[in-house]
Image (tube, coloured by chain):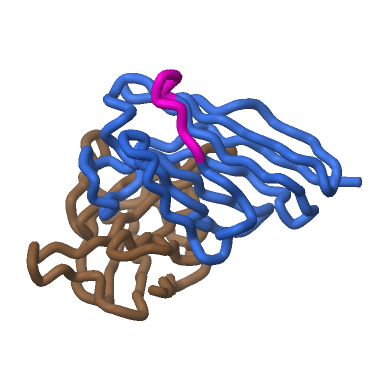
Amino acid sequence: EVHLVQSGAEVKKPGESLKISCQGSGYNFRAHWIGWVRQMPGTGLDWVAMIFPGDSNTIYSPSFQGQVTISADKSRSTAYLQWSSLKASDTAIYYCVRLRTESLSVRSWFDPWGQGTQVTVTS
Amino acid sequence: DIAMTQSPDSLAVSLGERATINCKSSQSVLSNSYNRDYLAWYQQKPGQPPKVLIYWASTRESGVPDRFSGSGSGTDFTLTISSLQAEDVALYYCQQYYSAPYSFGQGTKLEIK
C-alpha cells in the first residue's frame, strides 16, 4: 500500500527557517511526481510545487515561486519543502501529495495525500 | 492560469436525497489528443486530508461507493451523490490537472438538512 508520512507540527517565529518532510513508501519513489498543497485556516486548497525525484525536475506555482524550495532525496524516498524566512501568512497545513500516474507527465490527479503538517508562524 | 469555480458554496440535503455540486473551469480541460478531461473531485472530512473520489471527470476511484458519480466535459462538470448518507458530510473540491498551476475550486460544504 502506498503511504506518505509527513513530519510533525512546527511552531516558528517570523524570519526563521524551516524544512518539512514527506517520506513515501510502497511505490517507486523515483518514478512519480511528488508535491505540496497548502490549506490555510478555514480556506481551500492551493497547489505549491512539485518535483520528479528521478531527475529532480521541479515546477512551482507562480504564487509560491521564490517563497519556498522543494527538494527530494531519492536514497531516503523523502521530499522536502523549505522556507528561508517564514512569515505569519505561511501559517497553514501543508499536505504532501503524489501524482498517481507513474511517468514524467505532470498531468495526473493527486493520490494519496499525506496526513498534513501544521506550520504555525507567530511572534 | 485556469480558474475553477464551484457552486454552491454550501449545500444542505436530506438523507437519501440527491446532492449535486457544480464546477466550472475558465478554460477547457479537455485534451483533444486523448479525448479526456483532466478533472478530479476530492472529498475532505473534518480533520482529515482530502481523498480522491473521481478522476478523468467521470472515473470512480476504487473503493468509492457507486452513489458518487462525475459528469461533464470541457468547462462544465458535476459531482452527484445519488442518495446522501450521513458519512458523506464533508467538503468537496474539484481540481484541474490539465495545466500548471493545478488549481482547485473553492470547495462546497455538504451538510444534512
What residue is shown at x 41% (from left), y 43% (from top)? A51
Is residue B70 in sight in this rendering? yes
Q: What stretch is highlighted in magenta?
A: A71-77
Q: Color of chain B here?
A: brown
Q: Which residue lies furthest to the right in this view?
A: A123
Q: Is residue A75 magenta?
A: yes
- B9 sits left or right of A24 in the view: right
* Residue at figure coordinates x 56%, y 36% from the top left: A116
Color used for chain A? blue
Q: Where is residue A25 in the image (x, y as percent from the top left)?
A: 37, 20
Does residue B27 appear to the left or right of A83 in the view shown? left
Front position in the image: A99 or B110: A99
Q: Nearer the viewer, residue B13 or B93?
A: B93
Residue B55 x, y percent position in the rendering: 24, 52
* Above-or-below relation of A14 to B14: above
Find the residue positioned furthest to the bottom.
Answer: B26
Q: Where is residue B106 in the image (x, y as percent from the top left)?
A: 51, 66
- The question of residue B110 being in magenta is answered with no
Give the residue displayed 43% in from the left and 58% down from the top: B93
